[in-house]
């Protein structure tokens, strides 16, 4: 897994650096705007096999926003990623990796409990669209099954600072006529500190 792929302190090498950054703006009360980016490759130079297609370049840019006022919150995000050398990768592996990916979501939530309560119970709805074949290289035909839309509704119960119980239902679809995508019922617990 990922854990086995990391390097430790003095053993770490840097021969294929990546760059990531995030800027946030908090100048309007209740609103946060963000811009982020990631630029790099999937493999370090010393890990790349001599085979064409063993390494993919990634350039990813995202914008996000969050707004909160009294019992109402809203958030959204848009991400675009451009991948290069995907034609060679697909030829090597037999996969169908797209050369561009993009997605966005917008979500609104309302706290059903009084503002004076220590706990919060949010009813929320989210609309999201993500397309992992926004563009393709070479002879790879764009697959509309990878252009997905999900509408999610549910409840999140914040029982204490840093702890949430969540349940939601997802109505899922793709751009394929008569595409068979199963809806989902999800339950979870989140803990952060």
Image: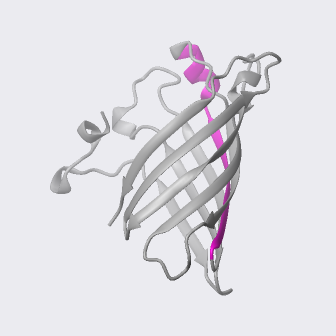
Q: Is residue 104 above or below residue 74?
A: above
Q: Is residue 71 left or right of residue 137?
A: left
Query: Considering depth in this image, is 57 or 154 the residue closer to the camera?
Result: 154
Seen as rendered, the residue at the extreme right is 177
User: In the figure, residue 83 lies in which quadrant?
Assistant: top right
At which x and y percent is residue 61? 64, 55
Looking at the rendering, in which quadrant would you find the C terminus?
bottom left
At which x and y percent is residue 34? 62, 69
Looking at the rendering, in which quadrant would you find the N terminus?
top left
**Residue at point 46% right, 53% down?**
18
At which x and y percent is residue 25? 62, 79
Query: Considering depth in this image, is 71 or 144 the residue closer to the camera?
Result: 71
Q: Could you tell me if residue 66 is visible in this image?
A: no
Residue 152 shown in magenta: no
**Residue at point 64% right, 57% down?**
62
Residue 84 shown in magenta: yes
Q: Could you tell me if residue 165 is visible in this image?
A: yes
Q: Is residue 13 above or below residue 143?
A: below
User: In the figure, residue 75 lies in which quadrant?
Assistant: bottom right
At which x and y percent is residue 145? 71, 22
**Residue at point 39% right, 41% down?**
44
Describe the colour scheme in one phrase: one colour
Q: Is residue 99 above or below residue 176?
A: below
- The magenta-colored residue range is 71-92
């Amino acid at each position: 897994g990922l854990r086995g792929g990391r390097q430790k302190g003095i053993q770490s090498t840097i021969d294929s650096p990546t760059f990531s950054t995030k800027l946030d703006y908090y100048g309007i009360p209740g609103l946060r705007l963000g811009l982020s980016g990631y630029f790099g490759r999937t493999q370090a130079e010393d890990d790349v096999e001599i085979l064409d297609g063993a390494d993919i370049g990634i350039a990813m840019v995202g914008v996000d926003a969050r707004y909160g006022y009294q019992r109402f919150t809203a958030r959204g995000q848009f991400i675009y990623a451009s991948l290069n050398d995907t034609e060679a990768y697909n030829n090597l592996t037999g996969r169908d990796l797209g050369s561009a990916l993009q997605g966005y979501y917008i979500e609104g939530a309302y706290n059903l409990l009084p503002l004076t309560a220590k706990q919060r119970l949010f009813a929320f709805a989210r609309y999201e669209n993500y397309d992992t074949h926004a563009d393709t290289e070479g002879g790879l035909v764009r697959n509309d099954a990878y252009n997905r839309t999900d509408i999610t509704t549910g409840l999140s119960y914040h029982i204490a600072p840093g702890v949430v119980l969540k349940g939601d239902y997802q109505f899922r679809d793709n751009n394929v006529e008569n595409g068979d995508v199963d809806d989902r019922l999800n339950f979870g617990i989140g803990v952060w500190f």
